Image: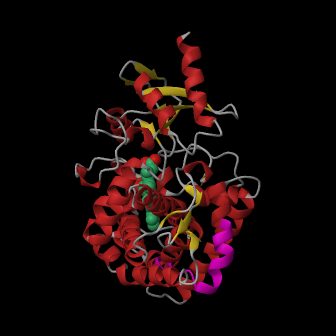
Amino acid sequence: MHVRLGKARSMALFDDAYPANPHPALAELRQAGPAHRVTSPAGIPFWLVTRWDEARRVLTDPSLSKQQPMDGLPPHLRSALTTQMLLRDPPDHTRLRRLVSAGFTPRRIEALRPGIERITDRLLDGFAADAEVDVIDRLAVPLPFEVICELLGIPAAERGPFRAWSDTIIVGGADLVEALSQSVAYFRDLLDRKRAQPADDLLSALAGIVDDGDRLSDDELVGMALLLVVAGHETTANLIGNAVHLLSRNPEQRSRLRDDPGLAPAVVEEVLRMASPSATSTYRVTTRPITLGDTTIPAGEQVLVSLLAVNRDPRRFADPDTFDPGRGDGGHLAFGHGIHFCLGAPLARLEARIAVSRLFARYPDAAVAVAPSELRWRTGVLMHGLRSLPVRLHAAA
Ligand code: HEM
């Protein structure tokens, strides 16, 4: 009986209605226990962790491994992808992360501010002739993409095809291997060009790194470049979209932000908690049994942390379903936790703060133009974000 009920509960994760409102299903799982064995409709089993305390344990326990064989990929892709730090354990992870961290220090990120403001203003200038815009298509997607291309040094004329490949990589599906092959080939060629003619960008810096005699191999460089584009693109777009959505549905918070743009950091943190753009962590595999509360996950099982669920755990957050930028207690796990904590968090935060404060400064009455039931959400359990967000820019006359 218990097993059957558990199964029925977890199947709600794969309902068509789930992406638009995942919280009732997640709340039920969280209430029932800290971790649940789930089987996807494709028959793939994994464990989903739904409580905050247990999530922190899973994300810091070194007995859970990130390394996956990726047997299904052709060798020329496997070599570039399995070297990505997100898919490595120490000591490889430690070395790779150390080599790239210099590009993401708070000072380096803060130096990007004028460029991010310029791109944001240019995108917002493009709204001028419209009464209604799709904020996903016109701001939330292009802003992070342009910023990461600038940071890495992808020439403007080459961004079009690259955007198409990276969209395919994120969505997956039949063209995935082809898009990965194209991206890997593109980055190999671009890195050769950066070596021949270094510029003031992150790829040139990474290509030239010689650190205590250590340096990134070609496969590692390509894997790193791909990870930076893919990890930061859709997640940040979801964050900006979810922020505009939540602010529009909470007009009092929207007015406060408009009157005091200094509130943007608190607003963005509360959006990360309430509507975590990366709905789950990435997969980890248990190398020995791990006990979470009354549940033991055996060795050799895949585990995902539901960031959406743990960030609304009432054991950690008072009144977790209320949007309250003033709660000020931090502690959300939207960027993960432990050694794989999101490298791009300072950049994502800066982009989202600039995007929402500038949008509402220019269009104080901007509001979602359709009823909640008409919004289109991204499907699947891994991401939480809108596919489109029609926004009316001016108050109704
Ligand atoms: C790791 C979320 C933006 C680069 C992660 C992890 C999460 C996450 C949850 C940890 C995954 C795990 O432990 O399983 C997000 C969210 C973002 C965002 C919600 C936007 C709102 C970015 C951006 C970049 C980036 C803009 C790069 C420019 C990375 C990298 C890792 C990572 C490189 C792997 C770090 C490691 O393995 O040590 N991110 N991310 N992310 N993120 Fe982000």
Residue at figure coordinates x 57%, y 68% from the top left = 222
Q: Position of residue 27 (x, y in %)?
A: 44, 32
Residue 264 position in % (x across, y down): 31, 66
Visible in this render: residue 53?
yes
Q: Residue at x 52, y 80 (%)?
A: 123
Position of 206 relative to 92 (above/below): below
Q: Residue at x 62, y 48 (%)?
A: 379
- Residue, far top: 1
Q: Which residues are magenta?
A: 150-165
Foreground residue among 177 and 43 = 43
Can you name the residue that lies furthest to the right here? 174
Q: Quadrant of residue 259?
A: bottom left
Quadrant showing the N terminus: top right
User: Any magenta on residue 38?
Assistant: no
Q: Residue at x 36, y 47 (%)?
A: 333
Q: Above or below — where is 96 with respect to 192?
A: above
* Principal secondary structure, stretch drawn in magenta: helix
